[in-house]
Amino acid sequence: MATATVQNDCDFSPMKEKLKEHLTQTNEQLGLLLSSLDRDGSCLLHEFEQIMNRFSQIKATAAAFYLRCYLSPYTDSYLALSTGIQHLSERRHGALIVIERNDPTESFMQKGIPVGAMFTHSLLESIFYPGSPLHDGAVLIKGNQIISAAHVLPHSTLYSGEKKLGTRHRAAIGMSEQTDALVIVVSEETGRASFALDGTLYPLAVID
Protein backbone atom coordinates (compact mmCIF):
# COMPACT_ATOMS: atom_id res chain seq x y z
CA MET A 1 0.00 0.00 0.00
CA ALA A 2 1.38 3.36 -1.01
CA THR A 3 1.70 6.15 1.52
CA ALA A 4 -0.50 9.14 0.75
CA THR A 5 1.33 12.18 -0.53
CA VAL A 6 0.11 15.61 -1.54
CA GLN A 7 0.82 16.68 -5.10
CA ASN A 8 3.46 19.43 -5.32
CA ASP A 9 1.18 21.48 -7.56
CA CYS A 10 -1.76 21.23 -5.18
CA ASP A 11 -2.65 24.90 -4.84
CA PHE A 12 -6.29 25.70 -4.10
CA SER A 13 -5.93 29.29 -2.97
CA PRO A 14 -9.41 29.92 -1.47
CA MET A 15 -9.10 26.84 0.74
CA LYS A 16 -5.57 27.77 1.79
CA GLU A 17 -6.71 31.28 2.65
CA LYS A 18 -9.52 29.91 4.80
CA LEU A 19 -7.04 27.71 6.64
CA LYS A 20 -4.72 30.67 7.21
CA GLU A 21 -7.63 32.74 8.50
CA HIS A 22 -8.64 30.03 10.99
CA LEU A 23 -5.06 29.58 12.20
CA THR A 24 -4.49 33.32 12.57
CA GLN A 25 -7.67 33.75 14.61
CA THR A 26 -6.77 30.80 16.80
CA ASN A 27 -3.27 32.16 17.37
CA GLU A 28 -4.74 35.48 18.46
CA GLN A 29 -7.16 33.74 20.79
CA LEU A 30 -4.33 31.75 22.37
CA GLY A 31 -2.42 34.99 22.94
CA LEU A 32 -5.40 36.43 24.81
CA LEU A 33 -5.61 33.29 26.92
CA LEU A 34 -1.96 33.61 27.93
CA SER A 35 -2.60 37.19 29.02
CA SER A 36 -5.69 36.15 30.97
CA LEU A 37 -3.71 33.64 33.02
CA ASP A 38 -1.96 36.53 34.75
CA ARG A 39 -5.25 37.84 36.11
CA ASP A 40 -6.28 36.42 39.46
CA GLY A 41 -9.67 34.77 39.69
CA SER A 42 -10.19 34.31 35.98
CA CYS A 43 -11.84 31.06 34.83
CA LEU A 44 -10.89 30.09 31.28
CA LEU A 45 -12.94 26.91 30.84
CA HIS A 46 -15.34 28.59 28.39
CA GLU A 47 -12.42 29.97 26.38
CA PHE A 48 -10.82 26.53 26.26
CA GLU A 49 -14.08 25.10 24.91
CA GLN A 50 -14.16 27.76 22.19
CA ILE A 51 -10.59 26.96 21.18
CA MET A 52 -11.36 23.24 21.03
CA ASN A 53 -14.31 23.98 18.73
CA ARG A 54 -12.11 26.19 16.57
CA PHE A 55 -9.48 23.46 16.28
CA SER A 56 -12.20 21.02 15.22
CA GLN A 57 -13.21 23.43 12.45
CA ILE A 58 -9.60 23.88 11.40
CA LYS A 59 -9.17 20.11 11.18
CA ALA A 60 -12.32 19.73 9.09
CA THR A 61 -11.28 22.57 6.78
CA ALA A 62 -7.80 21.07 6.39
CA ALA A 63 -9.39 17.70 5.62
CA ALA A 64 -11.44 19.26 2.82
CA PHE A 65 -8.31 20.90 1.41
CA TYR A 66 -6.24 17.71 1.47
CA LEU A 67 -9.14 15.62 0.20
CA ARG A 68 -9.13 17.71 -2.96
CA CYS A 69 -5.34 17.41 -3.20
CA TYR A 70 -5.49 13.63 -2.86
CA LEU A 71 -8.29 13.26 -5.43
CA SER A 72 -7.37 15.81 -8.10
CA PRO A 73 -4.82 13.55 -9.88
CA TYR A 74 -7.37 10.74 -10.13
CA THR A 75 -10.69 12.38 -11.04
CA ASP A 76 -11.97 15.57 -12.64
CA SER A 77 -15.27 15.19 -10.78
CA TYR A 78 -14.23 16.65 -7.43
CA LEU A 79 -16.75 19.52 -7.49
CA ALA A 80 -19.63 17.19 -8.41
CA LEU A 81 -18.47 14.76 -5.72
CA SER A 82 -18.32 17.60 -3.20
CA THR A 83 -21.86 18.66 -4.14
CA GLY A 84 -23.14 15.10 -3.77
CA ILE A 85 -21.52 14.68 -0.36
CA GLN A 86 -22.97 18.00 0.79
CA HIS A 87 -26.48 17.00 -0.26
CA LEU A 88 -26.20 13.54 1.30
CA SER A 89 -24.92 15.10 4.50
CA GLU A 90 -27.72 17.67 4.66
CA ARG A 91 -30.36 14.94 4.19
CA ARG A 92 -28.61 12.47 6.50
CA HIS A 93 -28.52 9.82 3.79
CA GLY A 94 -25.82 7.32 4.73
CA ALA A 95 -23.19 6.73 2.07
CA LEU A 96 -19.95 4.85 1.48
CA ILE A 97 -17.84 5.87 -1.52
CA VAL A 98 -14.57 4.28 -2.64
CA ILE A 99 -12.39 6.35 -4.99
CA GLU A 100 -9.75 4.12 -6.52
CA ARG A 101 -6.31 5.69 -6.89
CA ASN A 102 -3.25 3.55 -7.73
CA ASP A 103 -4.01 0.21 -6.05
CA PRO A 104 -6.61 -2.11 -7.64
CA THR A 105 -9.56 -2.45 -5.26
CA GLU A 106 -11.86 -5.19 -6.58
CA SER A 107 -10.07 -8.06 -4.82
CA PHE A 108 -10.61 -6.40 -1.44
CA MET A 109 -14.39 -6.02 -1.70
CA GLN A 110 -17.29 -8.33 -2.37
CA LYS A 111 -18.62 -8.10 -5.92
CA GLY A 112 -21.19 -5.36 -6.38
CA ILE A 113 -23.75 -4.45 -9.03
CA PRO A 114 -22.37 -2.88 -12.24
CA VAL A 115 -23.36 0.72 -12.95
CA GLY A 116 -20.90 1.88 -15.61
CA ALA A 117 -22.03 5.50 -15.84
CA MET A 118 -20.33 8.89 -15.90
CA PHE A 119 -20.22 10.42 -12.45
CA THR A 120 -22.83 13.02 -11.56
CA HIS A 121 -23.85 14.14 -8.11
CA SER A 122 -27.52 13.39 -8.87
CA LEU A 123 -26.67 9.78 -9.77
CA LEU A 124 -24.64 9.39 -6.57
CA GLU A 125 -27.49 10.84 -4.52
CA SER A 126 -30.05 8.53 -6.16
CA ILE A 127 -27.93 5.47 -5.40
CA PHE A 128 -27.84 6.32 -1.69
CA TYR A 129 -31.46 7.42 -1.44
CA PRO A 130 -33.03 5.39 1.42
CA GLY A 131 -34.82 2.37 0.02
CA SER A 132 -32.86 2.36 -3.24
CA PRO A 133 -31.82 -1.18 -4.26
CA LEU A 134 -28.19 -0.02 -4.33
CA HIS A 135 -28.04 2.15 -1.20
CA ASP A 136 -26.81 -0.57 1.15
CA GLY A 137 -23.10 -0.92 0.40
CA ALA A 138 -20.27 1.01 -1.18
CA VAL A 139 -19.99 2.73 -4.55
CA LEU A 140 -16.77 2.30 -6.52
CA ILE A 141 -15.49 5.30 -8.51
CA LYS A 142 -12.64 5.17 -10.99
CA GLY A 143 -11.67 8.35 -12.76
CA ASN A 144 -14.90 10.07 -13.72
CA GLN A 145 -17.09 6.95 -13.70
CA ILE A 146 -19.24 5.17 -11.15
CA ILE A 147 -18.17 1.62 -11.88
CA SER A 148 -20.42 -0.32 -9.52
CA ALA A 149 -22.42 -0.16 -6.31
CA ALA A 150 -23.61 -2.28 -3.36
CA HIS A 151 -20.11 -3.53 -2.50
CA VAL A 152 -19.32 -4.98 0.92
CA LEU A 153 -15.98 -3.73 2.22
CA PRO A 154 -13.60 -5.35 4.71
CA HIS A 155 -13.94 -4.02 8.24
CA SER A 156 -10.92 -2.67 10.04
CA THR A 157 -8.96 -5.17 12.09
CA LEU A 158 -6.44 -2.62 13.34
CA TYR A 159 -8.49 0.39 14.41
CA SER A 160 -8.50 0.82 18.18
CA GLY A 161 -10.08 4.25 18.48
CA GLU A 162 -13.66 5.21 19.24
CA LYS A 163 -15.62 2.10 20.26
CA LYS A 164 -18.97 3.43 19.01
CA LEU A 165 -17.75 3.78 15.42
CA GLY A 166 -20.47 2.63 13.02
CA THR A 167 -20.37 -0.13 10.42
CA ARG A 168 -19.81 2.23 7.48
CA HIS A 169 -16.95 3.97 9.25
CA ARG A 170 -15.23 0.70 10.15
CA ALA A 171 -15.62 -0.44 6.56
CA ALA A 172 -14.15 2.82 5.27
CA ILE A 173 -11.13 2.47 7.55
CA GLY A 174 -10.75 -1.21 6.69
CA MET A 175 -10.67 -0.52 2.95
CA SER A 176 -8.11 2.24 3.42
CA GLU A 177 -5.92 -0.13 5.43
CA GLN A 178 -5.82 -2.58 2.52
CA THR A 179 -5.33 -0.18 -0.41
CA ASP A 180 -4.44 3.44 -1.13
CA ALA A 181 -8.08 4.12 -2.04
CA LEU A 182 -9.72 7.15 -0.48
CA VAL A 183 -13.03 6.20 1.13
CA ILE A 184 -15.70 8.77 1.95
CA VAL A 185 -18.42 7.99 4.47
CA VAL A 186 -21.56 9.93 5.40
CA SER A 187 -23.28 9.05 8.66
CA GLU A 188 -27.03 8.57 8.45
CA GLU A 189 -27.30 9.26 12.19
CA THR A 190 -25.55 12.64 12.23
CA GLY A 191 -25.10 13.58 8.57
CA ARG A 192 -21.41 14.17 9.22
CA ALA A 193 -19.01 13.34 6.40
CA SER A 194 -15.52 11.89 6.85
CA PHE A 195 -12.89 10.27 4.71
CA ALA A 196 -10.54 7.40 5.45
CA LEU A 197 -6.98 7.27 4.13
CA ASP A 198 -4.17 4.96 5.21
CA GLY A 199 -6.26 3.59 8.06
CA THR A 200 -7.12 6.99 9.56
CA LEU A 201 -10.51 8.69 9.59
CA TYR A 202 -10.72 12.48 9.11
CA PRO A 203 -13.83 14.65 9.66
CA LEU A 204 -14.71 16.59 6.56
CA ALA A 205 -16.06 20.08 5.99
CA VAL A 206 -17.30 20.15 2.38
CA ILE A 207 -16.02 23.29 0.68
CA ASP A 208 -16.90 24.23 -2.89
Image: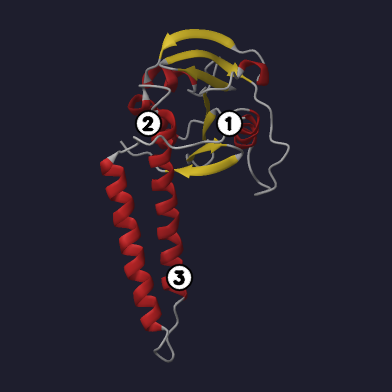
Residue linked to disc 3? 48
Mark 2: few/some/many CA within 10 Å (<14, 14-19, 20+): some
SS for tag 3?
helix
Q: Quadrant of the N terminus?
A: top right
In front of the other: 10 or 111 = 10
Tell me how far mark 2 sits from mark 3, CA to CA.
32 Å
Q: Nearer the viewer, mark 1 or mark 3?
A: 1
Q: CA distance from mark 1 to mark 3?
A: 38 Å
In percent of width and height, residue 8 lies at 38, 36
What residue is disc 2 on?
82
Tell me if residue 140 comes above or below residue 79 in the rendering: above
> What residue occupies the far front of the structure in this picture?
8
The three-letter amino acid code for the residue at tag 1 is Ala
User: Horizontal and vertical percent for residue 62?
Assistant: 41, 46
Is disc 1 in contact with disc 3, using a CB cutoff of under 8 Å? no
Q: Which mark is residue 199?
A: none
Residue depicted at x 63% and y 43%: 165
Left or right of 23 on screen, residue 113: right
Is residue 76 among what the camera can see? yes
Could you say which quadrant of the image residue 84 lies in? top left
Residue pictured at 43% horizontal, 29% vertical: 71
Residue occupied by mark 1: 2
Which mark lies nearer to you, 1 or 2?
A: 1
Q: Residues within 10 Å of mark 1 (few under 14, many from 20)?
A: few
SS at circle 2: helix
Residue displayed at 37% across by 27% down: 78
